[in-house]
Image: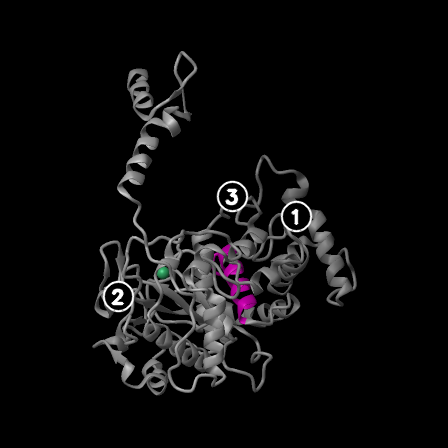
């Protein structure tokens, strides 16, 4: 990392170039001390220090005294970018410094607390906190490795279940900006010499990479080379797979978006006949809220290529009834070929192909929104198909073996009438216990409950 990268990682910051250059060597030493060895850890570190210190503007608490503060709290007020506070923590920091050979006297900071305002000790105090303190000591780097910026933020700010940390939006925004800087954040080149280099920036290579795999099955939308919702892609982690909810959705409709969501909604559209269309090159609004190891919580649009597959024909299907419509073979074959070509080019394992359903509901942050797409697609089976394709297991298009769907059955008129009857009057006309009881102790029906509501008003 150089001073210009430090400035980019600390945006918005109003600290002068001279001060940032002075901080840089201490900042890098502290990163090393905190075992910040990967891009994910570096993005977590920079985003939290940046948030806590307003872009390294403050190396100590602004407030120097308060009537409610004890003598200890006043003398050992918050210092360093992640504020070291209270004598007990100054002492533990000193002991850690002595154990690591940074100081000879473990009481140095207890005796001279103002030293921690100096960049050398202030940044190291952050390293100590990162590794040893907070609500879940020693776990911050593993949360960073999992891409769980919410847990990292809670470790810094205080962990209250069901509550977001202070400045959550700013912490996330900083994390996303830092991730986009990629390995420039690291002191040295990543520790995989000769290994795959992360693919970063807008995927201007989409057509070049997909054409050999797809031939005539590949089309492009005019202007795809410059289209996107704004901003640029960071290091591309992998692919998120979607269904459109309606087989009639076209590449054009994906490009345009919806009244409630600005397009493009994905970089790629795959039609039921297997035609693949490149729609856009920049970040697209496809992922929304979600989490997954390796990806920033709620921040996948800059890190993943979104693929919208036009499916199903029967728009009345739900997650539960999705197995009643089979994916067309031509579409599945193109999906598998696209997945293989992108996965190979990105140099990532096939596990970096996830469904929108997995992202939205089954990541480390739990369910962030309800999505079930792509329906009737067993992702483990599909990832296996992509892997076979990568390994050259398909000699030309071969028909994927999917489970046969059952015919979609609408309920009979009798069944529907019975459902309505039950909903109005309760099962067997006995009312609904959750609506309350009348003076004879009977459960209320829907009409009874509404009448009661109106009379109670
Ligand atoms: Zn989706």
Q: What secondary structure is found at the residue carrying circle 2? A: helix
Q: CA distance from mark 3 to mark 2?
A: 35 Å
Mark identifier at residue 254 = 2
- Residue 221 placement: quadrant: bottom left
Residue visible at 33% across and 66% down? Answer: 284
Chief secondary structure of the magenta portion: helix
Whole-percent x and y of residue 439?
40, 12
Q: Is mark 2 within 8 Å of ligand 1?
A: no
Q: Distance between the Cα atoms at labels 3 and 1?
A: 31 Å
Residue 76 numbered tag: 1
Can see residue 343?
yes
Foreground pick, 19 / 368:
368
Query: Residue 203: x, y in percent?
Result: 36, 78
Q: Position of residue 338 (x, y in %)?
A: 38, 77
Which residue sits at x=48%, y=84%? 393
Q: Nearer the viewer, mark 3 or mark 2?
A: 2
Instruction: Let me know if residue 373 is in the magenta part.
Output: no
Residue 20 left/right relative to 207: right
Disc sitting over residue 154 in the figure: none
Of residue 358 and residue 182, the one placed in the foreground of this image is 358
Which label's residue is closer to the chain start, 3 or 1?
A: 1
User: Which is nearer the N-term, disc 2 or disc 1?
Assistant: 1
Between marks 2 and 1, how big is the CA–CA gap?
57 Å
Magenta stretch: give its range: 39-56
Which numbered disc covers residue 162? 3
Quick check: can you spot residue 16?
A: no
Which element carries disc 1, helix, strand or loop?
A: loop
């Amino acid at each position: 990392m150089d001073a210009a990268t430090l400035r980019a990682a600390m945006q918005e910051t109003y600290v002068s170039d001279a001060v940032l250059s002075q901080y840089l060597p201490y900042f890098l030493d502290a990163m090393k001390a905190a075992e910040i060895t990967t891009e994910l850890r570096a993005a977590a570190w920079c985003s939290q220090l940046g948030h806590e210190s307003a872009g390294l503007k403050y190396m100590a608490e602004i407030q120097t005294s308060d009537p409610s503060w004890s003598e200890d709290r006043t003398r050992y007020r918050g210092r360093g970018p992640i504020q070291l506070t209270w004598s007990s923590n100054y002492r533990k920091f000193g002991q850690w410094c002595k154990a690591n050979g940074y100081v000879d006297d473990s009481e140095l900071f207890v005796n001279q607390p103002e030293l921690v305002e100096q960049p050398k000790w202030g940044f190291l105090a952050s390293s100590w906190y990162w590794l040893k303190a907070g609500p879940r000591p020693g776990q911050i780097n593993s949360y960073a490795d999992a891409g769980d910026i919410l847990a990292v933020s809670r470790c810094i700010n205080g962990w209250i279940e069901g509550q977001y940390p202070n400045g959550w939006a700013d912490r996330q925004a900083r994390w996303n900006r830092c991730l986009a800087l990629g390995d420039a954040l690291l002191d040295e080149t990543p520790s995989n010499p000769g290994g795959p280099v992360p693919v970063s920036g807008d995927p201007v290579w989409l057509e070049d990479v997909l054409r050999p795999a797809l031939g005539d099955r590949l089309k492009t939308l005019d202007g795809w080379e410059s289209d996107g919702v704004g901003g640029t892609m960071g290091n591309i982690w992998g692919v998120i797979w979607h269904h459109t909810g309606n087989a009639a959705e076209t590449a054009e409709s994906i490009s345009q978006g919806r009244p409630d969501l600005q397009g493009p909604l994905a970089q790629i559209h795959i039609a039921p006949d297997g035609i693949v269309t490149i729609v856009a090159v920049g970040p697209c609004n496809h992922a929304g809220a979600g989490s997954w190891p390796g990806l920033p919580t709620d921040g996948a649009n800059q890190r993943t290529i979104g693929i919208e597959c036009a499916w199903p024909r029967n728009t009345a299907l739900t997650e539960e009834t999705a197995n009643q419509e089979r994916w067309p073979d031509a579409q599945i074959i193109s999906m598998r070929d696209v997945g293989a070509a992108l996965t190979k080019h990105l140099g990532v394992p096939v596990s970096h192909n996830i469904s929108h359903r997995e992202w939205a509901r089954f990541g480390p942050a739990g369910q962030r929104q309800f999505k079930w797409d792509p329906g009737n697609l067993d992702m483990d089976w599909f990832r296996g198909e992509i892997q076979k394709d990568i390994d050259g297991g398909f000699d030309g298009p071969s028909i994927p073996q999917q489970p046969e769907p059952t015919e979609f059955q609408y309920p009979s008129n009798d069944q529907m009438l019975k459902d309505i009857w039950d909903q109005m009057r309760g099962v067997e006309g006995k009312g609904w216990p959750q609506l309350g009881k009348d003076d004879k102790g009977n459960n209320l029906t829907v009409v009874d409950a509404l009448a009661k509501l109106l009379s109670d008003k």
